[in-house]
Image: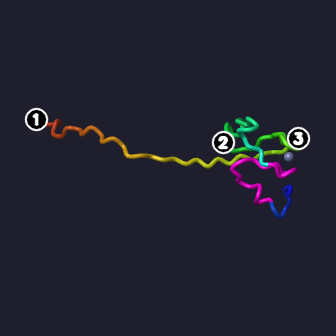
Amino acid sequence: MPLTRENESDYWREPQPKCPHCDHVCRVSDNEWWDLYDTNEGSHEVSCPHCEKDFTVNVTCEFSFSTDRQPKPTPVSEGADSNG
Ligand SMILES: [Zn+2]
């Protein structure tokens, strides 16, 4: 079902853009829409590969960061600052 007021949340924050005209999920990798990943936040005009109508994709970035166990730091030798 195309985008309506009732189902607009189905088109919101999807892992892949969904065409609001024909409900086709347009995979970024299939369409080589790498520009979408270049924008931190913002909107992009694209053409649906399925129905060939234009629509705007709003890009929302969600960063996630991970850290892992760190190597032990080299110990700093103490008592080197004797002052007189
Ligand atoms: Zn479409």
Q: Nearer the viewer, residue 56 or 79?
A: 56
Q: Quick check: is the Cβ at mark 3 less than 8 Å away from ligand 1?
A: yes
The residue singled out by tag 2 in the image is 40
Q: Mark 3 falls on what kind of element?
A: loop
> What is the spatial separation of the Cα atoms under label 3 and label 2, in whole angstroms?
26 Å
Residue furthest bottom as drawn? 6
- Mark 3 and mark 2 in contact? Answer it, CB < 8 Å: no
The residue singled out by tag 1 in the image is 84
Q: Residue at x 84, y 40 (%)?
A: 47
> What is the spatial separation of the Cα atoms under label 1 and label 3, in whole angstroms?
82 Å
Residue 45 lies, in percent from the top left, at 81, 40
Give the amino acid type for the residue marked by disc 2 in the picture. Answer: Asn
Residue 23 lies, in percent from the top left, at 83, 52
Segment tinted magenta in the rendering: 8-24
Q: Mark 1 falls on what kind of element?
A: loop
User: Dot 2: few (<14), some (14–19), or many (≥20) neighbours within 10 Å?
Assistant: few
Give the amino acid type for the residue marked by disc 3 in the picture. Answer: Glu
Magenta segment includes 55? no
The residue singled out by tag 3 in the image is 52
